[in-house]
């Protein structure tokens, strides 16, 4: 039985040791990026790397940085109160001259 388990492990790993290391490194980086919602700075910190080192590894491994969170702008609540009176100039008045 031991032989079959070792054979299964050998089949799941790439044939080259460098390929195995790159595959492991890629999985670690992708997991860290997923856990930080694509934030490379926080992923690098979690991995104990500088952000520049993580960026270099992403380029070397061919991992495209993914943004999992997209911001959609929605209109704010409708204003129901009186108009904003923070400006002292009345509407239609010429703009004030700059202070010297």
Image: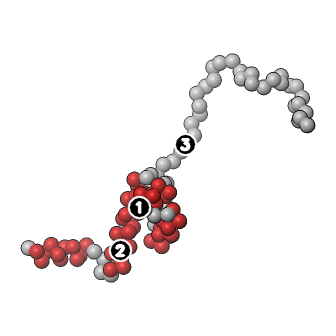
Can the viewer see residue 81 in this picture?
yes
Q: Which residue is identified by label 2?
A: 21
Rendered image quadrant of residue 81: top right
Q: Earlier in the sequence, mark 3 or mark 2?
A: 2
Eye-nearest disc, 3 or 1: 1
- Residue at the outermost bottom position: 16
Q: Residue at x 50, y 67 (%)?
A: 53
Snapshot colouring: secondary structure
Return the x and y of residue 96 as percentages of the image width and height: 88, 30
Number of other residues with Cα within 10 Å of mark 3, as a class: few under 14, some 14 to 19, many 20 or more: few
Residue 66 makes an appearance in the image: no
- Helix, strand or loop at label 2? It is helix
Query: CB of mark 2 within 8 Å of CB of mark 1?
Result: no
Q: Residues within 10 Å of mark 2 (few under 14, many from 20)?
A: few
Residue found 17% across the figure and 75% down from its top: 6
Query: Callout 1: helix, strand or loop?
Result: helix
The residue that appears at 91% across and 37% down in the rendered structure is 100
Mark 3 vs mark 2, CA separation in Å: 39 Å
Identify the mark at residue 55; answer none if there is no mark.
none
Tell me the distance, in whole angstroms, between the alpha carbons under discs 2 and 1.
Answer: 16 Å
Residue 1 position within the rendered picture, expressed as x and y whole percent measured from the top left: 8, 73
Mark 3–mark 1 Cα distance, whole angstroms, equals 30 Å
Task: Kindly identify which residue carries mark 3.
Answer: 72
Q: Nearer the viewer, mark 2 or mark 1?
A: 1
- Residue at the disc numbered 1: 47
43 horizontally vs 27: left or right: right
Camera-side residue of 96 and 94? 96
């Amino acid at each position: 039985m031991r032989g079959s388990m070792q054979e299964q492990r050998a089949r799941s790993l790439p044939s080259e040791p460098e390929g195995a290391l790159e595959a492991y490194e890629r999985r670690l980086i992708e997991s860290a990026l997923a856990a930080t919602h694509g934030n490379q700075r926080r992923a690098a910190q979690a991995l104990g790397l500088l952000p520049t080192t993580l960026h270099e590894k992403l380029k070397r491994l061919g991992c495209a940085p993914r943004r999992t969170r997209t911001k959609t702008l929605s209109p704010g609540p409708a204003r129901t109160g009186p108009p904003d009176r923070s400006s002292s100039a009345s509407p239609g008045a010429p703009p004030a001259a700059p202070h010297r």
